[in-house]
Image: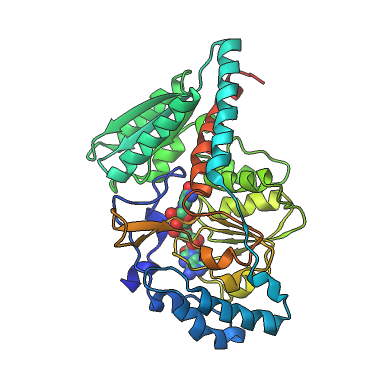
Amino acid sequence: MAAAATTSASTAFSSTTDCCNQGAKRVFRITALQVASTRRPSAFKSVRTINTNACTTDSRCSFSGFTKMWSYLSHSAGSAAATITASAKIIDGKSVAKEIRDEIAIEISRMKESIGVVPGLAVILVGDRKDSATYVRNKKKSCESVGIKSYEVHLAEDSSEQEVLKYISGFNDDPSVHGILVQLPLPSHMNEQNVLNAVCIEKDVDGFNPLNIGRLAMRGREPLFVPCTPKGCIELLRRYGVAIKGKRAVVIGRSNIVGMPAALLLQREDATVTIVHSRTKNPEEITREADIVISAVGQPNMVRGSWIKPGSVVIDVGINPVEDAKSPRGYRLVGDVCYEEASQIASAITPVPGGVGPMTIAMLILNTLVAAKRANNFK
Ligand code: NAP
């Protein structure tokens, strides 16, 4: 099972709006071995035993073990012991997402009343994955809750790529559809890049088109859409009044859908950004320098309290199912960051669930509204 903990999370998400691959039951069992496998700088070798023992098999981090470790770090680093007892502000993504949905609903009513246009989002689902079906259902529900019209196409697993392309082409030409989302993953016989590239850039509300990502990376260029999850992270920082300009930020993870665009966005906000990935030699040391940490790794509780700079702000994108015999589902969701530890050190932190997850879908419907406004030149 420890091997499972090192599995890439790339298959865990069907699109930016998804939370976890429940259908595939990618459930981690947290073991001391897995915790020990996270890299630590040699300077903190003496902490290793305590740190390793601090996570029990149900992934709850032991405060006593952690406090001892943090005392050691505080002592050796000369930090204030008071940071041990501090408790971070919770960055409540669920309530911010609701606030944003309410704002979107008002804008949609205004547009409908002024020009008679209702934004439309088309979702194409191929195959019978239960998790994908759940995500599509949730998107539909969220769209309906704000007044977006949703269009859904559900194709059989053995459909051809041509059939999917035909639907995309139809939606590209349909003026009542302002955003198109292809639910990922597609069946293995389809070329994902071909399919995603077929979505016209004006309707690419997932923001995955290389032209959008390229513009995001270039100074003086504006992408038409920014990928929903990283956009949601920045929006959380913004709404909680977290200053980004001039701050040191570390993004853990460099995936196309989260880590890489999150780093680009932080850079656009004038942060000094470092990306940590699976080949980074000293992730703990680097992360500890950050005023802002965004973690998108897919490894439960990998980022321990000792990685966090006192007073920093932590955005945990990771959504990882871990075994939990007490839960009726047999698992529960945890982030990449050991919340119990990090919340004692950071000044603000997102919970999992209820942090970044709800923001992702809020950003999808926001992108759809933006697409509809742009298509109709409505300010
Ligand atoms: P991904 O495509 O698997 O990318 C994971 C990234 O983490 C890779 O860049 C990888 O580095 C890096 N990584 C893996 N192990 C590492 C380690 N031990 N130390 C440092 N970096 C490591 O995953 P993803 O799609 O970005 O998703 C990441 C997490 O976010 C998952 O838990 C996913 O479920 C969650 N997620 C949440 C939302 C949401 O709405 N809240 C949306 C999307 C994803 P390499 O590049 O070197 O392989």
In the displayed structure, 110 sits above or below 324; it is: above
In the displayed structure, 260 sits above or below 46; it is: above
In the displayed structure, 199 sits above or below 359; it is: above
On the image, the x and y values in percent for residue 340 come to 52, 65
In the displayed structure, 374 sits above or below 249; it is: above
Visible residue check, residue 208: no
Q: Residue at x 53, y 61 (%)?
A: 253
On the image, the x and y values in percent for residue 84 come to 64, 72
Protein image colouring? rainbow
Q: Residue at x 52, y 43 (%)?
A: 94
> Residue 132: which quarter of the image?
top left
On the image, the x and y values in percent for residue 207 come to 53, 40
Q: Residue at x 55, y 14 (%)?
A: 112
Closer-to-camera residue (82/102): 82
Closer-to-camera residue (239/135): 239
Quarter holding the N terminus is bottom left
Q: Residue at x 40, y 31 (%)?
A: 141
Residue occupying the far bottom of the picture: 46
Visible residue check, residue 309: yes
Quarter holding the C terminus is top right
On the image, the x and y values in percent for residue 257 come to 50, 49
Residue occupying the far right of the picture: 246
| Tally of numbered tags | 0
Left or right: residue 369 versus residue 176 is right
